Amino acid sequence: MTLSDQELERYARHIVLPKFGGAGQQRLKAASVAVIGAGGVGSGVIPAMAAAGVGKLTIIDNDLVDRSNLHRQPIFRDDEVGSEKAKLAAQFAMAINPHVETVARERRIDADNARELLDGQDLVVDGSDNFATRLAVSDACIALGIPLVSAAAVQLQGQVGLFRGQPCFRCFVGDAFDSEDCDNCAELGVLGPLPLTIGGFAAMLAVRAIAGMGEDAGKLHLLDADQMGWRAIRLPADPGCRACGVPRRP
Ligand SMILES: [Zn+2]
């Protein structure tokens, strides 16, 4: 995959990075990435991935912009309240970087359609706002062999990690949350810059993984925006996990 003169100029500060270089930029250009959720986390992920030069960016979200979203979702404007988020987010990404192909999918992703929606992606970033969606996305990524960056932020706590095979997100969460929307921002609140920070971190994990800069899978990064600090925990695999483990004998 070659880079045009305009792209060489645009990505010059990437290309001079010894650990990234022209090879990393070409890998990024060759990659298709799906972002689930054009919300607070998506508002961090989408501009970062588009600016960095991912080849194809698919944005999956079936919501409309609500005025109560705007304090944490700066990719949307006040005059866009009531409009489709996926389409607006794709337009935002295209305006940042015309070299990125963008696709808006105005669908709600769930256990029934996740494989169909994610098939063919090289990496998925999940910034959805509930465990049921995150588990459905994780299971589909395991089945399709796609690395997943899962990112979440609520109140003053954020978490983000790269999952590639075992351990998967279901090893971490377990099977208790498949049918519950138990951590919705609407009820619990969230500090505006927190999901943007988590989304920016998620984009960094994604770009590093695609460019082959080093492996960070199986580790969860936790941001405490109350005491202000990051910590990382290594996640154990669940050998009997129904998504990534060896099926238990009855
Ligand atoms: Zn698992």
Image (cartoon, rainbow, N blue to C red):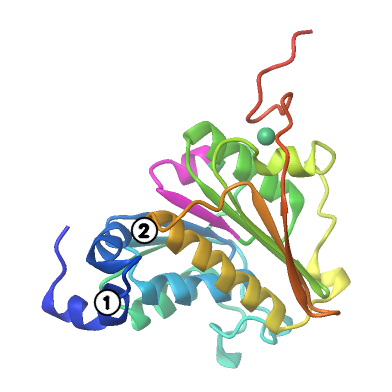
Tags 1 and 2 touching, CB below 8 Å:
no
The image shows residue 58, relative to residue 46, as above or below, that is above
- Farthest top residue? 250
Cα separation between marks 1 and 2: 14 Å
Residue on which the image places disc 2 = 211
Which stretch appears magenta? 115-126
Residue 148, position as x, y percentages in the image: 55, 49
Q: Secondary structure at mark 2?
A: helix
Residue positioned 57% across, 62% down in the render = 61
Residue at x 29%, y 57% (from the top left corner): 27
Of marks 1 and 2, the one in the foreground: 1
Q: Is residue 142 above or below residue 84?
A: above
Q: Is residue 156 left or right of residue 205?
A: right
Q: Is ligand 1 within 8 Å of the beta carbon of the residue shown at mark 1?
A: no
| Residue 119 lies in the magenta stretch | yes
Residue occupied by mark 1: 16
Tell me which numbered mark, 1 or 2, is placed earlier along the sequence.
1
The amino acid on which the numbered mark 1 sits, given as a three-letter code, is Val
Q: Quadrant of the C terminus?
A: top right
The residue positioned 31% from the left and 81% from the top of the image is: 13
Which residue occupies 72% across, 83% down?
Answer: 192
Q: Quadrant of residue 213?
A: bottom left
Q: Is residue 26 above or below residue 87?
A: above
Residue 157 x/y as whole percent: 80, 70
Residue 103: tell me if it is visible.
Answer: yes
Q: Locate the N terminus and report the quarter of the image it occupies.
A: bottom left
**How packed is label 1: few (under 14 Cα within 10 Å), some, or many (20 or more)?**
few
Q: Please say whether residue 6 is one of the residues in the magenta stretch.
A: no
Depth check, front residue: 222 or 77: 222
Give the side of residue 82 with respect to residue 228, left or right: left
**Label 2 crowd (10 A; few <14 / some 14-19 / many >=20):** many
**Ligand 1 is within 8 Å of the C-beta of the residue at disc 2:** no
